[in-house]
């Protein structure tokens, strides 16, 4: 059938009408920041602003609007999860009854000090507003110590729920409740069902995941409720949650393998109830720390926590009498009752007692707690007068002992998995303290933005594929270029490998000879391997030889990035041989730069000979701000001979108490002619300054520079035993606060 021209016109008009009708259904779909600004200027209660799907680069969204309780203003995505905000971007909003949802911030960082801000200026705050179903994923400033806050909640009656905040790599609080003006105090905010994804050790203060208030306003009430959140490996620093205000309620949260504690750092009258801490015996995992007055800690479940001192399972601190607002208020009328503590190592009472923190707790109680553990049979440490804490009805397994005379009864150790998969004491004991069902209050899957995947396994060495690499020039580089995170490069038995370019490591990688003769690797460049941000390196059964390195001072085998790294790296050297790092002076094994941080560095069963520089020098943070370069160092079963520099030189300065590294283990090594080179400024074979846990054992020194210790900050634990020093000076130390057992000097 042929259409008449009139019919055609009518059809055309109809189509036009349909199209404009479709547009009017979505009148506020915006595609650029200019369109966004234009729409925002016209918003009326009940209106929506919809960001078009796609990647938004370098955009600073500022939304000022007034909604009504039944007609909120909404800022949302065309489709949740399909609006990606990247580059140098952020969002601030103020007014009332505003709901933000469906946004994803990734591949960038904020140019200001906040990514999502509940205010548009000091005076313009958001009230009765909500951010939900949104994501901030590794939106980290590349400068590790350039501080920012990912989410800053100002105003009153705001809600932050079902969001995923993961992978913060730079300094600064992940989520902060700000109380800087009266308009942000007594705020009644609710923070619930959020997924706080993994955060690496920062190696400095400023790695809190959630902070409520600051010391300045800490005697004001915040009344923030934090419930049903999942904290997944949030390990930035000592404080996972730092409550720094009064009247908060922290309940029904899960802390999974997080290295840190829920700390009532300032403020009074906070309730901590029914939280679950699953340490799973991972290092430095902690529980709950009480400071200040009128705090209530009850019905929490704590499993497998290994942290000590301020990072113990349960901590009650000493305070400063009439101290300034930023120090520690004494613990007064606080209760730590009805908690279940299983397979955890430390309970610390009057922790931090010293000349300044001299006020012991008063009017406080520890009642009806169940302590079941064989992992440390003396879990309680009492640092000061505990007469101000009453002990009643606590239960302890009979193998363990307590220095506290009354208020504990002994029962057989009985721990079994319950129907919810949690390790619990006998039901009769649970019933006695009326704990109720032992069950996680929230599942990981019920938290966070529903559309966005959570973090499962963090990539590790040898978790990927294996790639065979032929002997030859730059064959390792080719293999690295085609490798993925966790892959293993297998070199030929006894094969010879030459690098004429830098081998850049961008993800976890293992390079090894499977068995038999070690493959030999040489390089013509200043460094063999460069660890860039995100990189980690494991060398196994290799021979690293410096004979082809350029004739210049300052070569090295492994270097970190020259630039700030906001991801932590790790390095393992196992069953290797390292020779001839001597083509010129100061040829180091590892060279690190400032603003880099290693989770762990391990040298195992390795021989290093004839080296004009140092092996591990981790001393680049010299400002004494409590910042340092490595968390764990382990040197075991290794031989060092003819090393002109030091084998290890680790520096951690300052008096800040927010971190717990470095932690160093030196065991079963031989040091021969080490540390005596004229360029070795440390004049030591090993030098440790401010190391917090140091264990040296079963090692011998021969014709070497001495061991030097500078014990500082908190209560460093230093143990030296079963060592022989022949033609080597005596240990140099700033004090004798270390444990020595069986040293022989010859
Ligand atoms: Ca802190």
Image (cartoon, rainbow, N blue to C red):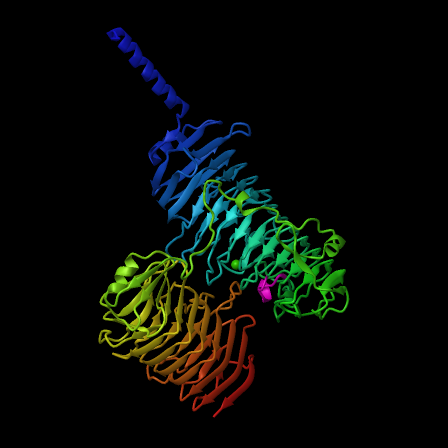
- Residue at position x 71%, y 51% in the image: 435
Front residue of this view, candidates 679 and 246 = 679
Q: Position of residue 114 (x, y in %)?
A: 44, 47
Can residue 115 be spotted in the picture? no
Q: Position of residue 156 (x, y in %)?
A: 56, 40
Report the side of 21 relative to 524 (left or right): right
The image position of residue 625, as x and y in percent, is 46, 65
Is residue 586 visible in this depiction of the protein? Answer: yes
Magenta part of the chain: 305-314
* Left or right: 267 as drawn, with respect to 511: right
Q: Where is the N terminus found, in terms of image quarters?
A: top left
The relative height of residue 64 versus residue 214 in the rendered view (above or below) is: above
Pick the residue in front: 627 or 542.
Answer: 542
Q: Residue furthest bottom?
A: 746
The image shows residue 616, relative to residue 468, as above or below, that is: below
How many numbered callouts? 0
Question: What predominant SS class does the magenta segment belong to?
Answer: loop
Q: Position of residue 285 (x, y in %)?
A: 56, 61
Side of 611 relative to 132 (left or right): left
Position of 47 relative to 522 (above/below) = above
419, 4: nearer the viewer: 419
Give the residue drawn at x 36%, y 74%. Answer: 576
Asked where in the image residue 77 lies, by quadrant, the reply is: top left
624 is within the stretch colored magenta: no
């Amino acid at each position: 059938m042929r259409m008449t021209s009139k019919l055609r016109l009518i059809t055309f008009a109809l189509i036009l009408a349909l199209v404009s009708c479709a547009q009017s259904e979505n009148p506020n779909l915006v595609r650029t920041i200019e369109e966004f600004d234009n729409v925002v200027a016209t918003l009326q209660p009940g209106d929506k602003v919809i960001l078009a799907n796609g990647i938004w680069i370098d955009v600073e969204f500022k939304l000022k609007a007034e909604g009504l309780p039944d007609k909120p203003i909404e800022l949302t995505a065309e489709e949740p999860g399909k609006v990606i905000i990247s580059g140098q971007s952020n969002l601030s909003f103020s007014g009332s009854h505003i709901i933000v949802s469906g946004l994803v911030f990734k591949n960038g960082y904020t140019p200001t000090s906040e990514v999502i801000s509940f205010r548009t200026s000091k005076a313009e705050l958001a009230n009765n507003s909500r951010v939900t179903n949104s994501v901030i994923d590794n939106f980290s400033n590349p400068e590790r110590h350039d501080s920012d806050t990912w989410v800053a909640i100002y105003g009153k009656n705001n809600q932050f729920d079902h969001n995923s905040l993961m992978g913060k790599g730079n300094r600064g609080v992940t989520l902060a409740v700000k109380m800087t003006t009266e308009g942000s105090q007594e705020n009644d905010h609710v923070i619930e069902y959020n997924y706080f994804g993994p955060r690496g050790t920062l190696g400095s203060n400023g790695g809190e995941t959630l902070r409520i208030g600051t010391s300045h306003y800490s005697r004001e009430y915040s009344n923030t409720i934090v419930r049903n959140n999942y904290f997944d490996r949030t390990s930035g620093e000592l404080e996972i949650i730092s409550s720094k205000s009064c009247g908060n309620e922290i309940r029904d949260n899960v802390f999974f393998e997080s290295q840190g504690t829920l700390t009532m750092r300032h403020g009074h009258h906070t309730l901590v109830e029914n939280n679950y801490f699953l340490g799973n015996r991972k290092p430095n995992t902690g529980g709950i720390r009480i400071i200040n007055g009128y705090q209530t800690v009850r019905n929490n479940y704590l499993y497998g926590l290994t942290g000590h001192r301020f990072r113990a399972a349960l901590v009650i601190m000493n305070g400063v009498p009439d101290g300034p607002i930023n120090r520690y208020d004494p613990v007064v009328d606080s209760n730590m009752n009805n908690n279940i503590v299983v397979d955890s190592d430390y309970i610390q009472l009057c922790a931090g007692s010293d000349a300044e923190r001299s006020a012991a707790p008063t009017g406080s109680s520890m009642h009806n707690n169940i302590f079941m553990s064989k992992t440390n049979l003396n879990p309680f440490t009492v640092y000061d007068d505990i007469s101000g804490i009453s002990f009643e009805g606590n239960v302890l397994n009979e193998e363990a002992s307590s220095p506290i005379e009354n208020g504990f009864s002994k029962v057989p150790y009985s721990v079994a998995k319950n129907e919810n998969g949690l390790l619990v004491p006998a039901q009769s004991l649970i019933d006695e303290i009326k704990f109720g069902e032992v069950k996680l209050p929230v599942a990981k899957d019920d938290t966070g933005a529903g559309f966005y995947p959570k973090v499962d396994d963090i990539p590790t060495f040898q978790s990927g594929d294996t790639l065979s690499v032929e002997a030859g020039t730059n064959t390792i580089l080719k293999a690295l270029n085609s490798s993925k995170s966790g892959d293993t490069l297998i070199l030929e038995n006894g094969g010879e490998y030459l690098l004429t370019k830098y081998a850049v490591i961008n993800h976890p990688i293992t390079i090894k000879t499977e068995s038999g003769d070690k493959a030999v690797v040489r390089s013509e460049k200043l460094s063999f391997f460069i660890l860039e941000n995100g990189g980690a390196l494991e060398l196994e059964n290799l021979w690293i030889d410096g004979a082809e390195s350029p004739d210049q001072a300052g070569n090295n085998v492994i270097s970190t990035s020259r630039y700030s790294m906001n991801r932590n790296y790790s390095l393992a050297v196992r069953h290797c041989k390292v020779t001839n790092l001597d083509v010129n002076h100061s040829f180091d094994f590892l060279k690190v730069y400032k603003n880099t941080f290693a989770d762990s560095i391990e040298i195992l069963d390795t021989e290093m000979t004839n080296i004009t520089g140092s092996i591990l020098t981790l001393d680049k943070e010299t400002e004494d701000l409590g910042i340092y370069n490595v968390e764990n160092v382990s040197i075991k079963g290794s031989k060092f001979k003819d090393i002109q520099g030091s084998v290890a030189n680790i520096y951690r300065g300052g008096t800040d108490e927010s971190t717990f590294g470095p932690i160093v283990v030196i065991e079963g090594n031989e040091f021969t002619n080490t540390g005596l080179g004229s360029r070795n400024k440390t004049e030591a074979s090993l030098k440790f300054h401010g190391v917090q846990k140091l264990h040296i054992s079963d090692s011998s020194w021969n014709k070497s520079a001495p061991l030097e210790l500078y014990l500082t900050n908190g209560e460093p634990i230093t143990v030296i035993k079963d060592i022989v020093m022949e033609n080597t000076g005596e240990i140099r130390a700033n004090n004798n606060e270390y444990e020595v057992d069986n040293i022989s000097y010859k």
